[in-house]
Image (spheres, coloured by chain):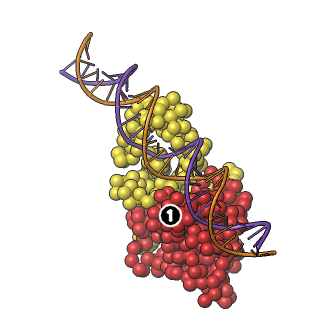
Chain colours: A yellow, B red, C orange, D purple
Amino acid sequence: MATLAFKLNEHLYLRDPQHTQLGQNIIQKSVEMIDRLGFEQFTFKKLAEEINSTEASIYRYFENKHKLLVYLISWYWHWIEYRIDIASGSLQNPSEKLRACLRVLADEKKFDAGFEFVNEEALHRIVVAELDKTYQTKGVDDYNKEGLFGGFKSVCRKITTVILEVNPSYPYAASLVSTILVSSNQQLFFSEHLPSLTTIGTGQERYTQLYKFMENIVFKSIQS
Amino acid sequence: MATLAFKLNEHLYLRDPQHTQLGQNIIQKSVEMIDRLGFEQFTFKKLAEEINSTEASIYRYFENKHKLLVYLISWYWHWIEYRIDIASGSLQNPSEKLRACLRVLADEKKFDAGFEFVNEEALHRIVVAELDKTYQTKGVDDYNKEGLFGGFKSVCRKITTVILEVNPSYPYAASLVSTILVSSNQQLFFSEHLPSLTTIGTGQERYTQLYKFMENIVFKSIQS
DNA sequence: CGATTATTGATAGTAATACTATTATATTTG
DNA sequence: CAAATATAATAGTATTACTATCAATAATCG
């Protein structure tokens, strides 16, 4: 299988990690470590040890660990968009397209062989556990000016467009979409850690339950 | 007006800050500072300087700054529940009760004279900007065992109950409520920092827009 | 192929953060 | 008033999040 790569915003990194061995090691191992340790406990020093490199070398790729997190999660949203395109590309019916989008969002994330050095399963757990940290920061406006949230926005825009195809007069499309994009991950988080806040369970059927919840909320909200 | 106080979970603090002058100074000034600096830039050292006390003294009240944040946001949810009780207490009709809940959530937060040393306007901005940091941490399960999320859960439970009064067979009540609790704050955040993700504007009418969005999502979702 | 250039590693250092410990001084309470 | 408690003052530590310098190695280019 051909190895694909996404063109991510240049301000996310100092040197493109997809182009070098060290860069790929940083991506691969940081996904594993942030998943395991959590973002707060993760440091460039620990990462350097694990990939047999140095802190200084990692700093040549990423300004700081927060930008690395934003990079990884941006990568995730590009990947989601790519999967949405595959899943909905051939569909004509707007409602069917919308259902396809929701299915991509709610689906269990499995390793995608198209992207060798990214473990999508672990990355999705990072998104579930850390997503909000990408924008809940005083630097959000600067980040936004640099276009660092382009991946997320692009997915949001795409699904918003589909919703407006289903019902052109629905007035809250963007808000509904950003709500479910965040909620689809948050509900999985709650199901694991704060189960009284959700109706999603912890078994294998959780992804089906999540899908049904999202389908209910979206289709009922937009019906005129 | 009588000064009220909420009985917050004991594990949130080492010494109850509501009972002493220093404690009240900590609460009052930390709200102002976290609002101004953001949670990451806020430190106990800076806080100590502003209230003419010492770092060590603050550590006698709170284990660390994260628990202080959890304390403040827990206080916020207790306050919301108190306002929901006032607003919905006299209502009989379940749909009207639900609307009253949503109104409390979507309303602009103004200073509540019942609680002298808490600036609810600033505290609400903190909730909008930092809410997810309270639970998006590796320590979430320990925190939860200690009951530190009791305020949030209690509000969630209360509104869930009202939803089930409106439609006893709606299967996603808890998920819908936790989704809108988070979303009601997130949409305000987006309207300020990432406006393409929301239909909410930045003017005075934003709270009305937020309410309408929430009413739409909730009532349409639960209708059978 | 040899010279230049870019990349990485090794090492060191700094300011700030998130605490902990100790002791002295107030302040409250019984 | 004595005893207990709360606070202030001060000091100290380990870790974090970087920055700087220079040597070694690898890639590339004329």
Left or right: D21 in relation to B54: left
- Residue A200, visible in the rendered structure: no
Q: Quadrant of residue B85?
A: bottom right
Image spot of residue B143 (x, y percent): 68, 58
Q: Residue at x 68, y 66 (%)?
A: B15
Which of the 4 quarters of the picture holds residue D5? bottom right
Q: Which residue is mark 1?
A: B49
Q: Of residues A22 and A43, which is closer to you in this image?
A: A43
Q: Is residue A132 visible?
A: yes
Q: In the image, is residue D7 above or below residue B139?
A: below
Q: Amino acid at mark 1?
A: Glu
Query: Residue sitting at 67 percent across and 86 percent down?
Result: B89
Q: Position of residue B101 (x, y in %)?
A: 60, 79
Residue B45, image x, y percentages: 52, 59
Picture mark count: 1
Residue ID at (60%, 54%): B137
Going by the image, does D4 lie left or right of B121?
right
Q: Nearer the viewer, residue B188 or B11?
A: B11
Where, by quadrant of the figure, is residue B150 drawn? bottom right
Which residue is found at the position 39% from the left and 34% from the top?
A: A19
Determine whether the residue tagged by mark 1 lies in a helix, strand or loop.
helix
Task: Mark 1: give few (<14), some (14-19) or many (20+) Cα within 10 Å.
Answer: few
Chain letter of the residue beneath label 1 in the structure image: B
Taking depth in this image into account, of B40 and C2 the one nearest to the observer is B40
A27 in relation to A172, above or below: above
Residue A77 location, x and y as percent? 46, 51
Horizontal side of residue A195 vs A133, given as left or right: right
| Residue in front for this viewpoint, A29 or C26 | C26
